[in-house]
Image (cartoon, coloured by chain):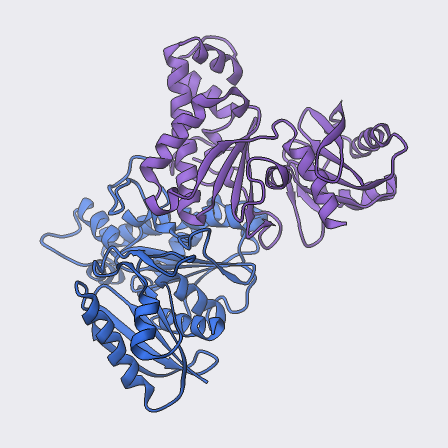
Chain colours: A blue, B purple
């Protein structure tokens, strides 16, 4: 059996064909047509066609950076991809490519991938956090992807870490995402007078690895907030693992060490004892693999 | 069928005999022997004897303010009742009173009660928060009491609302409980110069209902933190209801109104739309009823 998993990002769509256990056999990438739904669907259909290679494909899974209503399958809103709004992308794609399609929030798909074959493989309860431009998360509770009542569960990025903190893209203030994300890191670095002109979270990371003190402090401060979020999850949900992936985590241990230290300081000892805070095993393919495995398990 | 539910508090043990649907037919109360385990067991056995009234009792459920290991049944620790520490109270009680016994964290029992026959009756996903001296909570996810890996889930009181906030009894700082609890209210009132000498949260509430401005502000500030916690739960778990009970909530709407307003400001609109923030229906019996119904459903 073969499956295709797709991860729609703000700038590119990544796609992979996997076997039944989630191993990626072939992969493709294309820019995201963010403002035109027909072009987006055409781009996905083209990726599927190229990956198909005359093999029989049993299903397509698509991760979307947005809120998908689990009851109707409609994606309500996708902040970075304005063309996906109140659309049943599942239906539209199935008509176009003639195979079973399932859509899912992208962080939920990533969580599912890490749970099927990554750092949280087979655990009863695990949480996946993905740090990119923003912060996404997905919950595996009782060996199932936990979607909540409408399908919107897992918005850890919009839980509050500072009641009067930074304004967030969601309209609230003090959300975790304003601190722990590429955007948050750049903001923290600016406030610490890290450098003049424009720079990226990666620039800050590179400076930190070269021993630049301000940059190291920025990562430690970011890690502190990540650790607070981990402690909150441990105390509230008592999971076995918190798996952290995404572009920002690709930068490695600096953030993770600070997060672990802060979580140790705040989580209840009996709950902390049973929870590992670890790096993603599947990055950058967690989303693709998870989407493909969701197609497998829902067909 | 008859069941007995018991709610062990720091100062008193409350007990009730219920029918199969959780309706309380008879109730009793006795002071808690907090430092002597044998005396505690004897007190519970006496309550059971008195409530039994020669009826056949199918099971006993006991809510405990502490962390119960769901895998072993052992209560690790109960901060307010030092005698319950690393004890399998279930086993000890079953030997003594000769009937099936189940123990559970008291807020979890309350959540179960509100879900079986209270404000969250039959919902797929609901969260119960109980405001007393401290803050407890229990999660019903996918129509089941969610215990987490070890049984310690639901410690909302120890999630962080202020990274550098007040010291908490758990050893960390800035936990929700330091703000939203009887103790937290008294502290906030002290900081606002509410009154001289010693006073209780109830005194502050009484002043607020009489229009005393500082007291009203104290409740609004407390409600604001409760609202932040509600928004966090809504964004993370997308539940249908957050049910709030406990002694502090008995004081009514002032806190609830402020919490709802703050949650509206912070929760993601599509998730907020499907979630009600409501007062407990079963207070002060949620814990008793929930414990009895846990005995029913686990026997």
Q: Position of residue A3 (x, y in %)?
A: 40, 80
Please state which of residues B187 and A176 is positioned toward the viewer in this rendering.
A176
Q: Position of residue A295 (x, y in %)?
A: 43, 73
Q: Position of residue B35 (x, y in %)?
A: 74, 30
Q: Decide if residue A186 is on the left or right side of residue A247.
A: left
Q: Decide if residue A255 is on the left or right side of residue A40.
A: right
Query: So how many labels did they put on this image?
Result: 0
- Write down the quadrant of residue B49 in the picture: top right
Please state which of residues B8 and B188 is positioned toward the viewer in this rendering.
B8
Which residue is depicted at the point 58% across and 30% down? B281
Residue at the front extreme?
A95
Residue at the left extreme?
A197
Which residue is depicted at the point 48% across and 32% down? B278
- Write down the quadrant of residue A62 in the picture: bottom left
Which residue is depicted at the point 38% across and 90% down? A55
Q: Decide if residue A111 is on the left or right side of residue B249.
A: left
Please state which of residues A216 and A276 is positioned toward the viewer in this rendering.
A276
Looking at the image, is A218 positioned above or below residue B134?
below
Q: Position of residue B83 (x, y in %)?
A: 73, 35
Looking at the image, is B172 positioned above or below residue B238?
above
User: Could one spot residue A213 in this view of the protein?
Assistant: no
Looking at the image, is B43 positioned above or below residue B290?
above
User: Could one spot residue A113 in this view of the protein?
Assistant: yes
Residue at the bottom extreme?
A54
Looking at the image, is A169 positioned above or below residue B82?
below
């Amino acid at each position: 059996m073969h499956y295709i998993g797709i991860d729609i990002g703000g700038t590119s769509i990544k796609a992979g064909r996997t076997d039944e256990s989630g191993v990626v056999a072939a992969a493709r990438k294309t820019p995201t047509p963010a403002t035109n739904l027909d072009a987006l669907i055409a781009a996905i259909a083209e990726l599927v066609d190229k990956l198909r290679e005359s093999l029989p494909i049993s299903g397509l899974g698509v991760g979307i950076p947005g809120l998908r209503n689990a009851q109707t399958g409609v994606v309500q809103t996708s902040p970075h991809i304005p063309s996906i709004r109140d659309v049943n992308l599942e239906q539209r794609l199935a008509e176009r490519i003639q195979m079973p399609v399932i859509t899912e929030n992208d962080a939920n798909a990533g969580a599912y991938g890490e749970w099927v074959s990554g750092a949280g493989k087979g655990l009863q309860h695990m949480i996946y956090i993905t740090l990119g431009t923003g912060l996404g998360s997905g919950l595996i509770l009782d060996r199932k992807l936990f979607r909540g009542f409408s399908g919107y569960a897992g918005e850890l990025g919009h839980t509050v870490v500072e009641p009067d903190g930074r304004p967030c893209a969601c309209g609230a203030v003090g959300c975790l995402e304003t601190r722990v994300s590429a955007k948050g890191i750049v903001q923290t670095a600016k406030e610490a007078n890290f450098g003049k002109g424009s720079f990226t979270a990666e620039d800050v990371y590179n400076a930190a690895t070269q021993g630049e003190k301000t940059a190291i402090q920025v990562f430690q401060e970011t890690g502190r907030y990540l650790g607070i979020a981990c402690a909150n999850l441990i105390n509230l949900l008592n999971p076995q693992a918190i798996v952290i992936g995404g572009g920002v985590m690709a930068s490695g241990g600096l953030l993770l060490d600070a997060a672990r230290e802060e979580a140790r300081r705040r989580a209840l000892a009996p709950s902390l004892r049973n929870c590992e805070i670890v790096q993603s095993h599947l990055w950058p393919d967690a989303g693709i693999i998870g989407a493909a495995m969701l197609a497998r398990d829902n067909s």
